[in-house]
Image: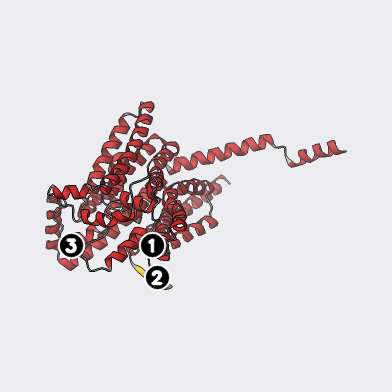
Amino acid sequence: MTLGYLNKKEEMEGEKKRGNGFLIFAAFLLSSAYNYFGGNMFSAGGFDFYLFLPVAAAGIVFCLTVFLVSPDLERMEVLWKQMWVLLLPLMFPFLWSFIIWIVNSANLVEMRKGVIVTAYLMSGIGMMAALTYLAGEDAVWIHLASLIVSNGATMVTVMLDGGISEFFRQLFALIVSFAGETGELMARLEIHGITYALGCYLVYFLVEEKNIKTHKVLFILTVFFFFTGLKRIALAGVVAAGLVGALWRRIERFPGISRFLYRLTGIGFLVLALAYVGAIFYGLYGFLEQLGINTSARADIYDMYKPYYSFSPIFLGNGIGWVEAQMSIWSETATDLVYNTHSEYLKQFIELGMAGFLIWCCLRCHFQISYASRKLGYRGGVLAFAMVTYIAATYATDTTATQVFINNAFGIILLSYRLKDRIREKRMENQRINRMRSEVYLPGDVFEKNIEGKTG
C-alpha cells in the first residue's frame, strides 16, 4: 500500500512538472508574440490599433482559463492586489482627464487617443500579471528572454537589409561616439522601445547581483542588445540607479536613515520634476541655443507648446491624449519639425496641469516604492527605488511613461519578486484566519442545540 501510494505521488509530481513546463512554454510564446508583433497595426471600425491589445487579451484569457481549471487562490490574490498598485499611476491620468475633458469641452479625437493609450498600458500590465501567474518567479526571465528574441529578430532583419559588416561598423561608431553618431541601421534599432525595457533589467541585475551568476547568458545578451539601441539617457539612468541600489544596500542596517533618505529623495524628485518643467516654460532651451549648444530644435518645439499651458497652480491641463492629437495637427503643416515633447515631465504637465502632475509623480514614485518596501521587504523596496530612479531619468528626455515595454518590464520584475515567499506567507495567513474562525464559531450541530435550548 505504501509503495502504491509513493508511485501515485511520483506520477502526480511528474504530471505537475509537465504541466508547469507547458505553462512556461505557453508564457514564452505569448510574451514573444506580444513583444515582436505588438508594434504592428490592424484596422477595426475605421480606426487603427496596435496588436498589443489583442495579444494581451489572449494572454489574460488563457491565464483565466488555467485559473478556472486549476485555481491557485493565494497566487491569484497576491498578484491581483499588486497588479492594481501598478495600474493606479496608469489609470490616474485617464480618470483625472475626465474632469478636464468636461471643463474644456474636449473633442473626440483627444479623448479617443487618451482612451487608447490607457488601454495599451493597462492591458500590458494585465499581460505581465498573467505571465507571472502562469510561470511564477520564472516569468521575469521568460519575459527577458522574449525581449531578447524579439530584439534579435529585429536586429537580424536590419543586418540582412544593410549588410553584416555595415551593421557592426555602425554599431562600433555608435558605442565609440557615445550615441553621438547614429547610422541609419542603428536608428532602426534605437527607436525600438525594447532598449528602455532592457535598461530596467540591467538595473535588476545590478541591484540583485546574484542574478548575474545564475543567469549569465541572459545578462550578457541584455548588455549587448542594450548597447545596440544605445540611448544616452538610458545609460545615465542605469548608472544612477546602480549607485542608488549600492547606497541603499549599505544602509540596510540603519532603517531610520533609509526612511529619512526615502522621504528626502521623494521630495527632491517632486521639486526637480516641477523645476525642470518651469525651466522649460521660462526658456531654458532657448538660453542653451544662445550659448551655442545644439538642442535638436527643442527650443523651437517648446515655443510652439508654450501658448497651450502655463506654469501656474491654477493651470488645469488639457487632458490625456492632447499632446498626441496636437502633434498630428502640426504634422499636417509643411514643416520638418518632429513635434514630440522629448520630455515626459512636460507632456504630463501640459495634459494634467500642475496639481495632476504632482499627483502623477507621487503615484509613479512614492506610491510604488512604499508598497514594494512593505510587501516585498527591504531589498524589494531598494529594487523599486532603483528602477524608479532609472525610469525618472528617462522621463527627462523621452516620453517613456506611455511606452508599453518599459512599463511592462518594471511591472513583471516587481510582480515576480519573492513571489514564492509571498504566496507562502499568504497561505499561512489564510490558514491562521481559518483557525481563528473555527475557534470563534461553534460547529453547526452544537450551535443548533444551543439555539434549541434557549428557545425551548
Residue 263 on image: x %, y %: 37, 33
Picture quadrant where residue 264 is located: top left
CB within 8 Å, label 2 to label 1: no
- Pointer 2 residue: 47
Q: Mark 3 vs mark 2: which is more N-terminal? A: 2
CB within 8 Å, label 1 to label 3: no
The residue under the point 79% across, 41% down is: 448
The Cα–Cα distance between marks 3 and 2, rounded to whole angstroms, is 31 Å
- In-front residue for pair 404/301: 301
Residue 311 on image: x %, y %: 33, 47
Residue 385 vertical placement versus 99 (above, below): above
- Pointer 3 residue: 185
- In-front residue for pair 93/80: 93
Residue 87 on image: x %, y %: 44, 50
The residue under the point 18% across, 55% down is: 296
Q: Mark 1 vs mark 3: which is more N-terminal? A: 1
The Cα–Cα distance between marks 1 and 3, rounded to whole angstroms, is 25 Å
- The residue carrying pointer 2 sits among few (fewer than 14), some (14 to 19) or many (20 or more) residues within 10 Å by Cα, namely few
Residue 234 on image: x %, y %: 25, 48
Residue 316 vertical placement versus 115 (above, below): above
Camera-near label (2 vs 1) is: 2
Residue 115 vertical placement versus 414 (above, below): below
Question: Does residue 286 appear to the left or right of 260 in the view shown?
Answer: left
The residue under the point 36% across, 34% down is: 262
- The residue carrying pointer 3 sits among few (fewer than 14), some (14 to 19) or many (20 or more) residues within 10 Å by Cα, namely many
Amino acid found under the numbered disc labelled 3: Leu
Name the colouring of the figure: secondary structure
Amino acid found under the numbered disc labelled 2: Phe
- Can residue 141 be seen by looking at this rendering? no
- Pointer 1 residue: 52
Question: Does residue 44 appear to the left or right of 298 in the view shown?
Answer: right
Picture quadrant where residue 107 is located: bottom left
